[in-house]
Amino acid sequence: MSSTIQARAIKSRPKRTAEQIQLSNKCTKDLMDDIVKHRSSIVNGAKDIAQNHKRSADWVLTQTFLGASMDPTPTKLKPNGWAHFLSHSYETRGANHPGGAEAMTTISKQISDEWATFTNEQKAEWSRRSLEAQQKALDEAKSKGQDVVKPAKRVKGKHIANTVEATFARKIDPTLAEVSQATGCHVMYIAVRNKLTDTYSPRNYASARLDEACMMFFKLSAEEVMMRLDAYVAGGLAQLATVTGERRGSLLQRVIREQVLYKLRKLLEERGVPADQMPNTMEWARYDKLIVLRFGVELVGYPGPGGKVVNPSAIESVTRLAQIEIAVRTGECYWRELSEEEWDALRAASEQQLLLGIPDDSAPSQKRAKKAHPAPSPPAGINASPLPFSESYVTPTSSAPSLAPQDSSLPSPMFPSSMASPFGMQLSAGFDQEFSPVHDPSFPRMPASQQLHFSPSLSSSSLAPLETDIQEPGYFMTLLNN
């Protein structure tokens, strides 16, 4: 019964009023504002210290946060009766004691038995004298203007390495393993060095499924990915080329292409462009049309003459490739979103160019260069005289029935007007390599002077089969010369 009443009491707990919620939100906001101010003051203070003492801001921040447990503290008085009794015995007995440096050892052995016979009151007395001696030494130091505070300890490389190893081995790795086993989720992290002189090793943790996924997608295990990332971050491209064995020029070209495309897709994602509309490859050849004009962004700061964007694959100079890679990595070369006015101006210029019929220089030509092939010579023992006419091709003219759409304003490139037949067909005999739909290279081309022309005196009976067959539009007809 009591549990039921307690449950009802819990359910009927009064909710916070609107004023209480607003007050709580205001307190939280004030707290976060103070924290942000404190953060900015710390960062700005670290920058000022670094500038004044010619140190890097990272080094100052490391000393600030990692060395917080090493702050100098005032010297504390600790009573030590045995140490004071030993010092007093050395001063009174060791002055004339033979043995030089071994005098302290000899005296400590002699008075140890005597110390064992002291009562608790006697030992407490020597502890009191120890405190008095320490306080007297502090007063003398202060009177002389000496610093009585312990010097601050510097954070060294070994401290950083110990912190990294202890944090990951004792805290992060066990926690991730526990979470992965308890919830069934898959976890992965990679920690790499900041520079090659760091004394700690890169670390990684990956569950079995994620390690398998890395091997499937990247053809590398999680540990190999970690090693390559560490080589690039700590040592740059030169170290990465050493690790992977890839040529530096090819590596630079690949990195530039990947980084430019990655940053482009990231900017478009921030603008809300759907994933299916984003470019899967960087259009270097038609950059102005397919990237700038389509998405309204441009690549600023690209190293080279006039800042012209050039495909890295077309650049053979390793020095220039290195300059481009550094500019892309450091942010000197970046994607910029065009304003609406700039984008509208580019669209208007493109439409004007299209209306005027000005060709696009960036568009790749689809025409292949024609290679001049000499006519094949006939085999030995065969007469090289022209062979008799065997085939002829027929095309419809504008006066023929509706066979194919024709433009009357354009001259016929295949057949002269003198070859028109009585029923509105143009006939041409002989083979023409340029216009024939079927061309056999082994068949010699017939000279124009020896081509067969049909005259208007041809009987309609001889052309009857042809007149029947030409009703199918768009086809070339063949006449057999029997």
Image (tube, helix red, strand yellow):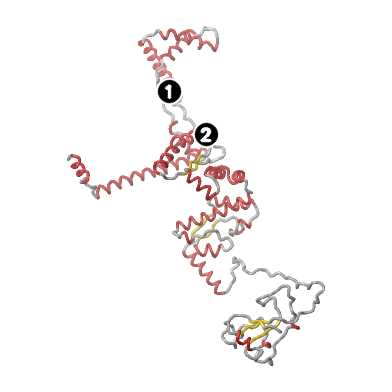
Q: Please tell me whether mark 1 sits on a helix, a strand or a loop.
A: helix
Q: Residue 55: where, in percent of width, then height?
A: 52, 39
Quadrant of the frame with the C terminus: bottom right
- Residue 57 shows in this picture: no
- Which x, y percent locates residue 239? 60, 43
**Percent coordinates x, y for residue 356 in the rendering:** 56, 74
Q: Which residue position holds label 1?
A: 142
Please indicate whether residue 66 sits to the left or right of residue 224 in the image. Answer: left
| Residue 21 percent location from the top left of the image | 27, 48
Q: Going by the image, does 338 lie left or right of 126? A: right
Which residue is denoted by mark 2 in the rendering?
Answer: 157
Q: 139 and 27: which one is in front?
A: 27
Measure how far apart labels 1 and 2 are at the Cα level. Answer: 34 Å
- Which residue is situated farthest in the left direction here? 1
**Callout 2: helix, strand or loop?**
helix
State the residue lying farthest toward the right. 381
Q: Comparing marks 1 and 2, which lies closer to the viewer?
A: 2
Q: From this view, report whether residue 106 is shown above or below residue 196.
A: above
Q: Residue at x 40, y 20 (%)?
A: 78
Res. 302 in view: yes
